[in-house]
Image (cartoon, rainbow, N blue to C red):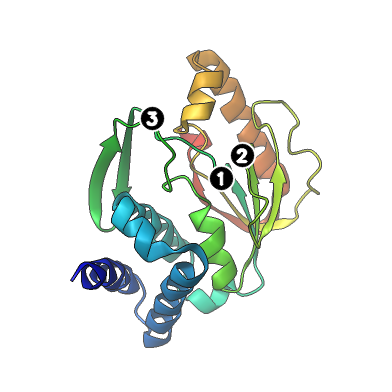
Amino acid sequence: MKKELIENRKDRLIAGIKGLWEDEQDHARIAKTIQALDTRYDLERKLAREPGVAEIIAQMTGRLARSYARLADLQGKRILDIACGSNMSKLPASLHIKTPLGELSVGGSKGYTVLFEPWFCRILIELGAEPVGVDFGDLEQEAFTHYRVDLGKTGALDFLPEASFDAIQDSRLFGSPEFTAEFPDQDDRLKVAEEINRQEQRLLKKDGIIIHSDAAAW
């Protein structure tokens, strides 16, 4: 019974997000991707431990659906995920997530959370893209290209070549507990946002797209 409940969580996640695309081939691609996340990263168990993971994945796939009409369009695309998440983050006091499945508020724990694992890059690599993740946390066991970077430092992304990405997203830096602790002052966070905006414009190809940018909101 317990195993069936866990599987139902995964099935509900697939059912909830495959409708973001109209084509049946895309439905099959996204279902295969979720199955691969389970095989490689034990998604079923993590959904049982923290149901909010489903909303995180729905949020990420929702952004892809708004940016790419067909999942096949992701093939070979070089995509930068700034503050991609890691395998060492702790849950903040509160976290609000808006996704195609609805809205969710979680928090109140000081322990490790799977919510901040690098789900976006993991999804992208399963879909045939070429993700590059940058984060200050641990990414050593991940299959995608990654760099450990202190995004609070000016010029931290200068090592990446100009106009080298088809798409960029940043979405997890300003809400991460580590970043908030390091930069409690709003003016300091604004400076970081300005630097990330500068880097996004420098790194994006002429016909590239911003999938999502929290830095732009500052």
Sequence order check, earlier mark of 2 and 3? 3
Task: Tell me the SS state at disc 2.
Answer: loop
Q: Residue furthest left?
A: 1
On screen, 114 above or below 3?
A: above
Task: Tell me the SS state at disc 1.
Answer: loop
Q: Is residue 203 left or right of residue 86?
A: right
- The residue positioned 79% from the left and 38% from the top of the image is 158
**Which residue is the site of mark 2?**
137
Front of the two marks 3 and 1: 3
- Residue 110 in picture, x, y percent from top left: 38, 30
Q: Which mark is residue 117?
A: none
**Which residue is the site of mark 3?**
110
Q: Which mark is residue 86?
A: 1
- Residue 184 in picture, x, y percent from top left: 49, 15
- Residue 208 in picture, x, y percent from top left: 63, 58
Tell me if mark 3 has few (under 14), some (14-19) or many (20+) residues whose alpha carbon lies within 10 angstroms of its own. Answer: few
Sequence order check, earlier mark of 1 and 2? 1
Q: Are marks 1 and 2 in contact (CB under 8 Å)?
A: yes
